[in-house]
Image (spheres, rainbow, N blue to C red):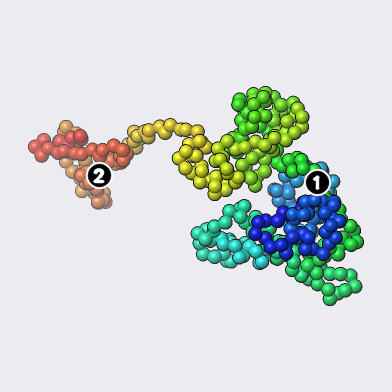
Amino acid sequence: MTPEPMRPGWDDALRYSMMRLPYERLLDIDARLAEAAARPVVFPETLIYDHGKPYQADTLRRACLRLGINPQDARQLTPTDKAMVERVFGTIRTQFSEHVAGYKSYDVAHRGRDVEAVARWSLAELEEFFAEYVVAVYQRQHHDGLIVPGFPGARLSPNEAYALALTYTGYVACPTDPNLYYDLLPIEKRTIQPGGRVEIDSLIYNADVLVQYGNSRSPYPDGLWPIRHDPRNRLHAYFQDPADGGWHLLRWTHAPDGCSHSPTSPCARSNRSSPAGAAAARPSRTKSPRRCWPCRTAPTRPSRGPAPTGAVRPATPNGPAPPPATGTGPTRQSTPPSSRSPRRCASFPTPTRTTSTTSSTTTWT
């Protein structure tokens, strides 16, 4: 819905001005097209999506309501309701995803060996690669599904089909309100701490405009303050001042000077992994010494009841050993008392036994 901006290093052949469109006339409608890439700008009337969690979010429904788009749920387990979208996913997998280092495929049978070891790209870098693929490859390839009535042999690319459609329908200007970006961001309801601090997902943001609202209730029914944030860039959050309706930028308090990356980027991760950054990013905790709990397992007891024939009862402390029992029962091999050891906790020393040969007594020490 918005023009795709040109990236540094992209060839001029990928500019919006290279499309077969009345560029000068469109530039008067939307000045953003001057630095845009060759990708169509479409204002949809109906949005069909499945039952995935991102499509059921409140952010998407608020965006459709704000822009006048008709949202429709596809039937469950019916991919034919959005067959063109499913086909695009297959094209992206074969033309782009399979050539990215660390690709895990859709099942283990088509997965490489140790793909985690070769993965090297962050989400921000993959987003840049995919944007270049769409502009430089997908939009310029001829698609068999794009046909012209009356010309069955004509093969068009998405950009050529878009230019042809504009001759019939005209250009539909998309919203250019600069505040629309903030209005459609996800909302987190939070309290404002003293000093103008706000915490979102363990990240603390602050700004001078929040100082006056510290420890105060918001004018909204729940008393909480709506803070908007972009999940793709956690370096900033956004606050709308109810006094004048203006938007204010909230910056992550532990962001290094000159850093323009998200806290999940390599720049921020390296800062948080350093001793100073790690100490600032999380509260200090005093580690309690480990306690050695007493062993609750009782030592091995001698079996109860009369001993079988040939068995020797263990010696009784401070007393003579009883004579061997006699009987006609079956003979059973018995474990000598000297080979038995009580079960003890590893944290306590194993007891030793000393035996006096003169009095036939046993003493545990």
Residue 98, how many percent across, how many down?
Answer: 62, 65
* Left or right: where 184 falls relative to 125: right
Which mark is drawn over residue 340? 2
- Residue 238 lies, with reference to residue 114, above or below; the image says above
Identify the residue shown where x is 86% and y is 69%: 148
Residue 345, how many percent across, how many down?
Answer: 32, 39
Location of residue 144 (image quadrant): bottom right
Residue linked to disc 1:
176
Number of numbered labels in the structure image = 2
* Left or right: where 352 falls relative to 215: left
User: Does any portion of residue 327 appear in the rendered image?
Assistant: no
Amino acid type for the residue under numbered disc 1: Thr
Residue 46, how many percent across, how many down?
Answer: 83, 52
Residue 263, how many percent across, how many down?
Answer: 58, 44
Identify the residue shown where x is 69% and y is 63%: 11
Q: Secondary structure at mark 1?
A: loop
